[in-house]
Image: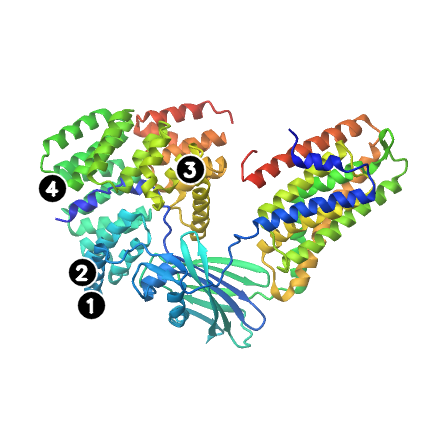
């Protein structure tokens, strides 16, 4: 009687979640003007089950064993992925095969290109059949990028096809889309705002022998602010561009920690001034760091390869517009109340101290991966 | 003591352009150095340097008798994919392997063995295959779909005891207690006395009659001297669970350990015992119990929790593994991991709101004391007593005694929103 083995697990087991991951593949497709560029990560365990990669049967898959099967893997995978444009099947070729690691082990990475001809259809038809015959719980996790927009989908045996839109959006639309993202990021990026504010707070003062005194005219304050904002802008534009074009890349944790660090220093500098004549240099130096922060947002958005410059400039201008709004709101108000006790004591000193506290907490959180707030 | 960067900032002589740039250059250099030190370890596809590099260790070791047996069954099934008996043998073997190892891929392989019947109307599918497919569905927490198949199997064969007991199991998880009571009674009429007693006791223990249920089931187990070992182990596990419902941790522990003595690799019992010990703060024992199982994903969270409580560095590595796993699972848009992820968000990331959202999503699918516990805990931490109302309603409606849950509910009542 085989019954017993099945009663054992009765309901009880269902109640414990199963952190073990079922089989997934990661398929990313990018639309370019003349072709589709793809990356497909397929688990070695799945390839082993389908094709038998472990040639010597020792329970370990080596790079040599995998390499020997490259041809077979490419054929096996590509006949199970069909791309059509206007009813015509695209010709798909694997360009390279690499290895990557996901949370459940090693994956073969297939880099491929699909040529769909020059048809002017407005969509690609995708049909995904990988592994469904061997493991119906397998899913294809698709990411489709076209014209800077990313769509994701989960492909399963009951739902294996997708219509991938190639919505040709106008350049102007693309430009303003990225511009809006830039404004939005400054608006929600409280750390950037606080950094800027910390540098702007003393703009209505001059530093004399007896500490800070208020400026007499609006002009010096205005030029001071202009220099700071321009320096910050130039600096973060440089690193934003370098990072967005993948010329430099820094781990997010490092840049985010450094950004918090810059806020801390800028705020402390108001309380114990060391740099006051040339705060624009500080703005420039740390602007370089903040640029990396902006770049990670841009990377998450996905950059349209065909309109890189357009997106970069649009995003950057959006960031500037957001900054200018903050400055326009801050400067006249600060100038008006610069002589008051409230500004000198509460806004300036207490405000800087509060900013410094926040920055310190962020720095610890980001640097040490803690959750304090 | 002041942190080093304060010192550095103050060393700079009084403001001159030169020292400004110097200071900035200094910080720049420090940041660049830090960045360079941590830059490696970035995940990107790569080309291994050498053919002998081992990329993956497969779960099956060479000469493994289980794998040999599977290979034989797979051969039989492939030779005749429409043969119900061959398909069932293969699917059961894969499903058992999934339960022994906690590896969800085997559930997929079991599903594939039954592919010939996947799209057939239930009335045209043999009852045994329907029940097997229902088991696979419940593993993925597709409880409603599983019920449809179990009902179809019982429509074909009302005396199908496996279908009955699985329907009771799914009924418990989804809080269909009246239906469970009927299925338990029906099992008794089929002569499955110990099974029926366990079914009934587990139900009663949820409905606020834990102590009498415990005593009845203990007596039934003592009277059944010829119980199959697996059924005996199951009953011991149930006794442990029920003992916890009325706060008898010592008896619960005794039963779990007796069950482990019968099968030291039972993932459910290991997880449940670890949970019980954790509740008592016996972290050393948890770590010792689970150390041999550091490759089991089902037990990974419990192990990470114990190691963290003991301040061991391995906890961070495991937390990272779990974080990556949850991120990958999120892409699949399934709630199977929601309970574990809720615990993780609450305990490791201190994100009570996210934990509560996940716990409630899990509660919408399954409703057992463990599922209730995480909702209450997350609601207390997030100071959102109103969100836990479905769980409080369930507790009131069942009258469940569980002192741990009662304690959490009273803590929740004191939360000021």
Instruction: Give SS at disc 3.
Output: helix
Res. B190 mark:
4
The mark nearer the N terminus, 2 or 4, is 2
| Pointer 1 chain | B
| Residue wearing tag 2 | B86
Frontmost residue, B306 versus A91: B306
> How many C-alpha atoms fall within 10 Å of the one at disc 3: few (<14), some, or many (≥20)?
many
Corner quadrant of residue A146: bottom right
Name the residue carrying label 3. Answer: B343
Q: Position of residue B33 (x, y in %)?
A: 63, 48
Question: CB atoms at circles 1 and 2 under 8 Å apart?
Answer: yes
Residue B288 image point, x, y percent: 33, 35
Q: Residues within 10 Å of mark 2 (few under 14, many from 20)?
A: many
Q: Residue at x 33, y 51 (%)?
A: B104
Cα distance in 3D space between marks 1 and 4: 36 Å
Task: Indicate left or right for B383 with B219 as reference.
Answer: right
Distance of mark 1 from mark 2, alpha carbons? Answer: 9 Å
Q: Secondary structure at mark 1?
A: helix
A16 over A146 or under it: above or below: above
């Amino acid at each position: 009687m085989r019954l017993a083995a099945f009663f054992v697990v009765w309901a009880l087991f269902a109640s414990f979640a199963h952190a073990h991951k079922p089989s997934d593949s990661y398929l990313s497709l990018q639309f370019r003007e003349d072709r589709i560029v793809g990356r497909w990560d397929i688990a070695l365990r799945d390839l082993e089950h389908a094709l038998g990669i472990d040639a010597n049967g020792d329970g370990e898959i080596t790079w040599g064993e995998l390499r020997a099967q490259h041809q077979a893997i490419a054929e096996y995978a590509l006949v199970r992925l069909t791309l059509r444009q206007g009813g015509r099947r695209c010709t798909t070729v694997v360009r390279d095969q690499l290895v990557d690691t996901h949370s459940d082990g090693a994956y073969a990475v297939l880099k491929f290109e699909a040529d769909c001809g020059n048809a002017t259809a407005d969509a690609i038809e995708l049909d995904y059949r990988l592994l469904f015959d061997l493991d119906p719980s397998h899913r294809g996790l698709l990411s489709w990028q076209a014209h800077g927009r990313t769509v994701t989908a989960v492909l399963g045996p009951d739902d294996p096809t997708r219509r991938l839109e190639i919505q040709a959006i106008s350049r102007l639309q693309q430009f303003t889309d990225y511009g809006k993202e830039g404004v939005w990021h400054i608006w929600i990026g409280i750390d950037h705002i606080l950094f800027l504010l910390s540098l702007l707070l003393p703009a209505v003062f001059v530093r004399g022998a007896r500490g800070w005194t208020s400026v007499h005219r609006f002009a010096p304050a205005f030029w001071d602010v202009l220099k700071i904002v321009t320096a910050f802008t130039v600096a973060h534009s440089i690193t934003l561009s370098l990072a967005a074009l993948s010329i430099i890349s820094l781990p997010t944790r490092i840049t985010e920690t450094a950004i918090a660090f810059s806020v801390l220093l800028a705020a402390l500098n108001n309380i114990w001034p060391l740099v006051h004549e040339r705060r624009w240099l500080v703005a420039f130096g740390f602007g370089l760091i903040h640029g990396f922060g902006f770049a990670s947002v841009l990377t998450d958005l996905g950059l349209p390869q065909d309109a890189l410059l357009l997106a970069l400039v649009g995003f950057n201008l959006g960031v500037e517009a957001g900054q200018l709004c903050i400055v326009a709101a801050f400067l006249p108000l600060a100038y008006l109340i610069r002589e008051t006790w409230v500004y000198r004591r509460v806004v300036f000193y207490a405000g800087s101290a509060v900013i410094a506290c926040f920055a310190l907490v962020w720095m610890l959180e980001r640097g040490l991966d803690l959750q304090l707030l | 003591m002041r942190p080093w960067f304060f010192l550095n900032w103050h060393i700079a002589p009084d403001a001159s352009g030169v020292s400004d740039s110097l200071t900035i250059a200094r910080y720049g250099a420090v940041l660049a150095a830090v960045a360079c030190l941590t830059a490696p370890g970035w995940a990107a596809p790569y080309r291994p340097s050498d053919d002998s590099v081992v990329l993956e260790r497969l779960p099956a070791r060479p000469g493994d008798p289980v794998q040999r047996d599977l290979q034989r069954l797979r051969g039989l099934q492939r030779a005749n994919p429409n043969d119900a008996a061959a398909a069932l043998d293969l699917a059961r073997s894969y499903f058992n392997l999934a339960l022994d190892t906690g590896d969800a891929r085997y559930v997929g392989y079991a599903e594939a063995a039954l592919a010939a019947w996947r799209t057939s109307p239930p009335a045209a599918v043999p009852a045994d295959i329907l029940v097997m497919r229902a088991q696979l569905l419940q593993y993925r927490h597709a409880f409603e779909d599983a019920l449809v198949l179990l009902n179809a199997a019982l429509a074909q064969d009302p005396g199908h005891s496996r279908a009955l007991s699985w329907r009771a199991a799914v009924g418990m998880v989804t809080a269909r207690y009246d239906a469970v009571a009927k299925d338990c009674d029906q099992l008794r009429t089929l002569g499955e006395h110990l099974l029926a007693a366990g079914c009934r006791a587990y139900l009663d223990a949820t409905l606020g009659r834990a102590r009498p249920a415990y005593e009845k089931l203990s007596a039934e187990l003592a009277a059944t001297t010829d119980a199959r070992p697996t059924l005996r182990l199951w009953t011991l596990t149930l006794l442990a669970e029920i003992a916890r419902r009325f706060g008898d941790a010592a008896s619960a522990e005794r039963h779990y350990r007796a069950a482990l003595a019968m099968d030291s690799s039972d993932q459910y019992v290991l997880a449940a015992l670890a949970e019980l010990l954790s509740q008592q703060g016996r972290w050393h024992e948890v770590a010792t119990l689970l150390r041999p199982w550091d490759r089991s994903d089902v037990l990974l969270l419990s192990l990470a929790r114990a190691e963290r409580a003991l301040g061991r560095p391995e906890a961070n590595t495991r937390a990272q593994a779990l974080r990556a796993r949850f991120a990958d699972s999120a892409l699949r848009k399934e709630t199977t991991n929601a309970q574990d992820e809720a615990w993780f968000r609450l305990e490791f990331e201190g994100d009570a709101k996210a934990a509560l959202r996940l716990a409630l999503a899990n509660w919408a699918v399954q409703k057992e004391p463990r599922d209730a516990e995480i909702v209450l805990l997350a609601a207390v931490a997030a100071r959102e007593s109103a969100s836990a109302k479905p769980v409080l309603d369930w507790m009131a409606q069942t009258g469940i005694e569980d002192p741990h849950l009662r304690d959490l509910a009273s803590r929740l009542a004191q939360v000021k929103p």
